[in-house]
């Protein structure tokens, strides 16, 4: 068999051409050299080690942090006729024995393991008896103390170079800022390797943020209007909120399942399995869900609370649209989100250096949220790129926010904070500005202030938006150790003194942008194509159920879209579709050609 990477790309994986730096990375690994690959989710990272594994003699060992998702990757490879296996604690003793025997016999091309497996029960000695082609370290940002998902067990992976000095190592991640990148290189000993930066842009994702006013009702409206049948992930900060939001979505008739660390392991396993193997399932989760998720047809990721930093936001939103088809990243945020996250930044268990870094990362996220600039521009600039100023696929580009002169409003806010002794939260300050008659105002005599009732030109929601922006800009502070009291930052002085003008965004709720299209209406040119696509999806689902595998390991949505648009009539034409290699052409071609022939499209 040919050892040419292009042969495997077309004949096995069914893709006509390499994307971006894939071919350069693959040839670098084939030259037995180390590398760090920074490539966005959905950019084709897995091919960068799967194709070298097929080209080289021996077995490629893939180290992945999540046991639960390894089998799905193995299923996808086996559909392509590739000898792959996972070795983890979910297997029975007999099954683990079978995998080890296949490994020692040289019958495997790829073996997936968790980092803990390397150092358990003499596994390193077992590997020493095998011909290893390469080591692939997936989700490599887990090795970094500066990353958002640090995992101590990853630190031990540096020993790979000591035990196997001549075996190439490939570290891969979709999420790494400059400090994290440097940490990965240092901790894994990749100083003599090459760094491949493929860019962080996900042009198919539309980034959309809205002021949180209705909370869950806003989310339900978004899902109903644009993703009434699509799979999606909704992130919430607390377990309690996960349960509540999942119940409210389920009450609309959708399949919505909660997922968090407080649920039993078996419940989480079944939930994840349903998400991967059924169509249109919505998962409502804490950040415990998602790393390594290969499901390519997640059409939206929604955040009901702010993530902790830009890396977390980028990685979580990156789980949408891995297949390259249109997808949404939707986030609703409010004043309490900002105060809550700022309070979480005060953690005595962390070093002062780490707390300072956490605060800086949060400030970058808040600036992203409150800016009137292109979302994609700010996101990519954060990761060190030099992007265009406009993308035409985010809320700020599609519906530019209105700005207003907020100098006087800010002065009212600053004055009230100062007069109340810099010890009260935003809710009480807003009550004073709106002239509310509350027990607390009467108790402290705050109805006598000059600013009492002075802010009635703005609604409570307007004031909440103003205070949130003042916090994001660092003009005011929130007490992170007490009860959330607001205080003035020295940087507010020029605005307070009238020496500088302040422009803020007007409150916007659930912006109606030009983007309001479903995936089907954006892609298909006729109703007949949509109907055929739905028929092909149901056929794929039935086949997947028969084999107990996720539908996407048979064909991605992108391949079904091509079928519906091009309507191939012969096996040769079917084999030309993206994602149809020789194995899938032989296994499924005739069946899907019959569906296409008998349709009315």
Image (spheres, rainbow, N blue to C red):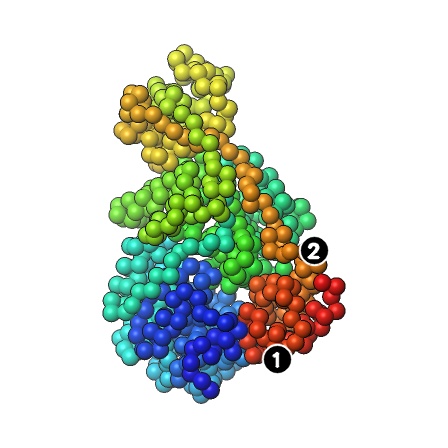
Residue at 35 percent across and 49 percent down: it is 381
Q: Is residue 474 visible?
A: yes
Q: In the picture, which quadrant includes the C terminus?
A: bottom right
Task: Label 2: state its secondary structure.
Answer: helix
Q: Is residue 166 left or right of residue 301?
A: left
Which of 359/36 is in front? 36
The reply to whether the C-beta atoms of the residues labelled 1 and 2 are less than 8 Å apart is no
Mark 1–mark 2 distance (CA, rounded to whole Å): 30 Å
Q: Residue at x 54, y 54 (%)?
A: 326
Frontmost residue, 55 versus 312: 55
**Numbered disc in front, either 1 or 2:** 2
Q: In the visual, does 168 lie left or right of 107?
A: left
Residue 348 visible in the displayed image: no
Q: Is residue 215 left or right of residue 187?
A: right
Asked which quadrant contains residue 367, the reply is: top left
According to the picture, the residue beneath numbered tag 1 turns out to be 586
- Crowd band around label 1 with a 10 angstrom C-alpha radius: few (<14), some (14–19), many (20+): few
Residue 36, picture quadrant? bottom left
> Could you say which disc has been placed on residue 527 in the image?
2
Q: Position of residue 394 (x, y in %)?
A: 48, 45
């Amino acid at each position: 068999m040919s050892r040419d990477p292009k042969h495997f790309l077309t004949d096995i994986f069914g893709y006509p051409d390499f994307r971006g730096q894939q071919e350069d990375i693959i040839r670098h690994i084939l030259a037995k050299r180390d590398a760090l690959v920074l490539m966005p989710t959905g950019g084709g990272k897995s091919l960068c080690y799967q194709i070298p594994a097929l080209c080289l003699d021996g077995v490629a060992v893939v180290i992945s942090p999540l046991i639960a998702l390894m089998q799905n990757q193995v299923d996808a490879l086996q559909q392509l006729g590739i000898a792959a296996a996972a070795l983890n604690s979910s297997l029975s003793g007999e099954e683990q024995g079978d995998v080890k025997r296949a490994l020692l016999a040289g019958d495997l091309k790829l073996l997936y393991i968790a980092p803990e497996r390397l150092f358990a029960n003499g596994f390193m000695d077992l590997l020493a008896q095998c011909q290893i082609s390469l080591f692939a370290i997936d989700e490599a940002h887990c090795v970094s103390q500066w990353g958002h998902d640090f995992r101590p067990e990853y630190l031990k992976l540096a020993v790979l170079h000591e035990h196997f000095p001549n075996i190439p190592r490939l570290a891969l991640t979709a999420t790494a800022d400059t400090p994290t990148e440097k940490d990965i290189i240092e901790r894994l000993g990749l100083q003599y390797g090459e760094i491949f930066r493929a860019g962080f842009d996900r042009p198919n994702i539309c980034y959309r943020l809205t002021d949180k006013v209705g909370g869950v009702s806003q989310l339900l409206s978004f899902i109903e209007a644009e993703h009434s049948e699509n799979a999606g992930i909704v992130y919430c900060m607390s377990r309690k909120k996960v349960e509540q939001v999942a119940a409210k979505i389920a009450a609309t008739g959708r399949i919505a399942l909660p997922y968090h660390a407080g649920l039993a392991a078996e419940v989480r396993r079944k939930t994840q399995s349903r998400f991967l193997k059924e169509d249109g399932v919505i998962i409502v989760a804490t950040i415990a869900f998602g790393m390594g998720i290969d499901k390519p047809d997640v059409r939206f990721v929604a955040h009901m609370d702010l993530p902790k930093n830009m890396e977390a936001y980028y990685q979580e939103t990156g789980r949408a649209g891995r297949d390259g088809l249109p997808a949404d990243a939707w986030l609703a945020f409010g004043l309490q989100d900002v105060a809550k996250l700022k309070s979480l930044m005060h953690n005595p268990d962390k070093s002062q250096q780490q707390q300072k870094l956490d605060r800086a990362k949060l400030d970058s996220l808040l600036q992203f949220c409150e800016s009137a600039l292109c979302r994609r521009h700010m996101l990519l600039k954060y990761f060190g790129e030099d992007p265009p100023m406009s993308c035409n696929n985010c809320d700020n580009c599609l519906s530019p926010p209105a700005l207003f002169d907020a100098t006087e409003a800010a002065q009212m806010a600053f004055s009230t904070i100062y007069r109340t002794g810099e010890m009260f939260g935003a809710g009480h300050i807003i009550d004073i500005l709106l002239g509310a008659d509350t027990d607390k105002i009467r108790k402290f005599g705050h109805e006598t202030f000059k600013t009492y009732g002075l802010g009635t030109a703005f609604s409570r929601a307007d004031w909440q938006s103003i205070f949130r922006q003042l916090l994001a800009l660092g003009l005011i502070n929130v007490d992170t150790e007490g009860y959330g009291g607001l205080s003035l930052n020295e940087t507010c002085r020029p605005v307070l003194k009238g020496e500088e003008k302040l422009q803020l965004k007007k409150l916007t709720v659930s912006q109606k942008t030009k983007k309001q299209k479903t995936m089907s209406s954006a892609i298909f040119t006729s109703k007949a194509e949509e109907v055929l696509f739905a028929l092909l999806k149901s056929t794929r689902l039935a086949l997947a159920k028969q084999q107990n595998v996720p539908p996407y390991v048979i064909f991605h949505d992108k391949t079904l879209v091509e079928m519906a648009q091009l309507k191939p009539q012969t096996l040769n034409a079917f084999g030309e579709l993206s994602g149809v290699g020789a194995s899938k052409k032989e296994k499924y071609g005739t069946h899907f050609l019959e569906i296409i022939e008998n349709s009315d499209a």
